[in-house]
Image: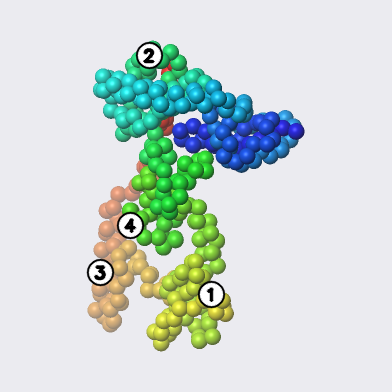
Amino acid sequence: MPYHVTVRYGALSLKGAFETTFADLNEADDVVVRTDRGTELGHVLAKPFEVPEGKRGSAGEVLRRPTSQDREAIARIQAEQVQSELHYCREKVREHDLPMKLVGMEHLLGGEKIIFYFVAEGRVDFRDLVKDLAGEYRTRIELKQLGVRDEARLLADLGHCGHKICCRLWMRKLEPVTMKMAKAQKATLDPTKVSGRCGRLMCCLRFEDPVYEELKRNLPRKGQRVVTDAGTAEVINYDILSQSLTVEYPDERRMRIRLSEVKQVLPKESRGGKTGNRSRSSPSGGKPKAQASGSAGRKNAGRESRANANENSTKPETDSKDQPPQTGEDKVQPSTEEGTES
């Protein structure tokens, strides 16, 4: 029976399910894996589990447990090659005067590829740089441009909570976090308190958002009337987590009550019916005017109707079919953040 095991690998803490024949692997064990990038070192995140025959791992396969030669090669790469290769690449960046900042690199265990990570404000033409690096190291060279969130995943360690940052520890995909989520959770809008190590809104706001949305569905909206033991009141505020309401009674008393104390939620009244007669406009398209009484009112009405008739007769007619339709279109050009040359 084949097994799959979840492994974290690479400088960006990538995760994936790998095929393995080692059923006795444990959490935190080191393994040598083959990925689409090459041969590299990985760390087991959970024990292997059985899968149906013929189902392949999405990320690759586990080749072996690290041998003494593998550990010596890893120590040599970290102690010698990484620093010298990073220094050489920085010199070449200055030589070509490229608007980019190197923030890290990876030299794969198998030597199939060297990956340099950089940040830049826009796209960078690094073709000459790749040629210089490939000629120096005689292997595949990849330059990968990072956003601010990926930069934090590469360089940062601990978050505000004191634990390792989620994007480095277990997250596979970085999904967007919106200010609406922060407002729904009544979080402070101070950027220093709601931003993560990357400077963007913390991912934990998105983790908790579905719970807040579910709890919010149980609460009446602001402005709705509710019936309680003390009478009918209007909801002026609510707290999602505590499932409580702040209501105001007709005598202007305000009370904080639990949702369980609400006997009935009354439907919200439509305001259109109350002001329907007041919003009626005059035939001339202006504001409604009070009708004059007596003979003066009849004379004013006659003069007004004649003026409107003359105005309508002198106004040129236009056909809506002759007017070209107004259209607007925004096109967003896709951009990529990765370039590879060998």
Q: Find the distance from the CA under tag 2 to the CA under tag 1.
A: 70 Å
In the image, residue 271 above or below residue 38:
below
Label for residue 170? none
Kindly state the secondary structure of the residue where label 3 is placed.
helix
Q: Amino acid at mark 3?
A: Arg
10 vs 121, left or right, is right
Q: Amino acid at mark 1?
A: Leu
Which x, y percent locates residue 212? 50, 61
Closer to the N terminus: mark 1 or mark 3? 1
Do callouts 2 and 1 mark residues in contact (Cβ within 8 Å)? Answer: no
Kindly state the secondary structure of the residue where label 2 is placed.
helix
189 vs 29, left or right, is left
Which x, y percent locates residue 57? 64, 32
Nearer the viewer's eye, disc 3 or disc 4?
A: 4
Which residue is identified by label 4? Answer: 190
Viewer-proximal residue among 279 and 60: 60
Q: Amino acid at mark 2?
A: Glu
The answer to whether one can see residue 166 in this image is yes
Task: Residue at 40% x, 22% y: name it.
Answer: 81
Which residue is identified by label 3? Answer: 303
